[in-house]
Image: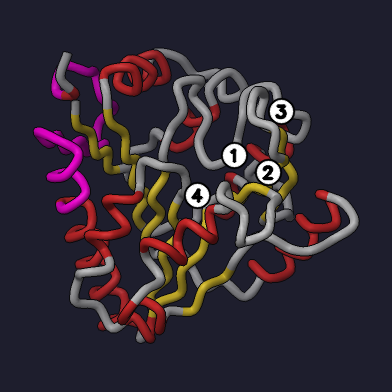
Amino acid sequence: MAICELELPAGLVAREFDNPGLLAEGLAANVADRLNSAINERGIATLVVSGGRSPVAFFQSLAEQAVDWSKVVISLADERWVPVEHTDSNAGLLQRYLLQGPVAKARFVGLYQVADSLEAAALLADKALAELPTIDVLVLGMGDDGHTASLFPNSPNLTEALSLDGERRCLPMLAPTVPHQRLTLTRRLLNSARQPILSISGQAKLDTLRTALAGDDLAQMPVRAFLTPSLEIYWCP
């Protein structure tokens, strides 16, 4: 099944690529164009990205784009509560594959904080995010269970994290099968992005997306909260 065979809501844009390399290149070019437009219009641009293994090629391609990175603020949609030096740190991933060369001039706003508890770390991250400019580009991924960022089904704080009325920008979150505790941006902050993008690859992810599009229970599949007409979907087999 190709993404063009899905019944997409009106206004939602889907872009299909032949392989992950072409997707990474296309996504990087699009993100760079939007960052440059924001810099031209407002003198600053803000990019929020997701971690994990999938975005590495995208990060590497983005790092080669012509952008005035000194005018860009970069942050994360979610983070594992581990030091930057830890192999599972999303901030560490960015340092290795994106925040290199010219991109090192960007201002990075990380989520990991040293604290006595995950809740205390989330409060410190929330305070740091208060200084984050309006998000120009948000790049999300999606798990096979329908989670995005670290908004996991059945996580204790999910209802608060998905609320559009909450005041928090960052909340602690628990992944059901992964040992590390998480920090996640809330739906309210993520939804403020001028251009949200969902990047997925593989038939399993496309099947998950089809299931998500067929229902409306956000708690069951939190990615549904972001399947709005402003979303661009990037997919490859």
Residue lying at 53% horizontally and 22% vertically, measured from the top left: 221
| Cα–Cα span, label 3 and label 2 | 11 Å
Number of the label disc, if any, that sits on residue 155: 3
Q: How many marks?
A: 4
Residue in the foreground of this view, choosing between 24 and 100: 100
Asked if the residue at tag 1 contacts the one at tag 3, i.e. Cβ–Cβ closer than 8 Å, the answer is yes
Asked if the residue at tag 4 contacts the one at tag 2, i.e. Cβ–Cβ closer than 8 Å, the answer is no
Say above or below: 194 vs 17.
below
Say above or below: 94 vs 66.
above
Check disc 4 and report the residue beneath it.
Answer: 191
Neighbour tally class for label 4: few under 14, some 14-19, many 20 plus, Cα within 10 Å: some
Q: What residue type is labelled 4?
A: Asn
Q: Based on the displayed image, in which of its 4 quarters is residue 189 positioned?
A: bottom right
The label nearer to you, 4 versus 3, is 3
Residue 157's x, y, as percent? Answer: 75, 35
Residue lying at 33% horizontally and 42% vertically, measured from the top left: 231
Considering the numbered disc 2 on the image, is that residue within a helix, a strand or a loop? strand
| Cα–Cα span, label 2 and label 4 | 19 Å
Q: Earlier in the sequence, mark 3 or mark 1?
A: 1
Q: Quadrant of the C terminus?
A: top left
Considering the numbered disc 3 on the image, is that residue within a helix, a strand or a loop? loop
Residue lying at 54% horizontally and 60% vertically, measured from the top left: 91
Magenta-colored span: 4-25
| Cα–Cα span, label 4 and label 3 | 20 Å
Considering the numbered disc 4 on the image, is that residue within a helix, a strand or a loop? loop
Residue 8 lies in the magenta-colored region: yes
Q: Which of marks 4 and 1 is nearer the N terminus?
A: 1
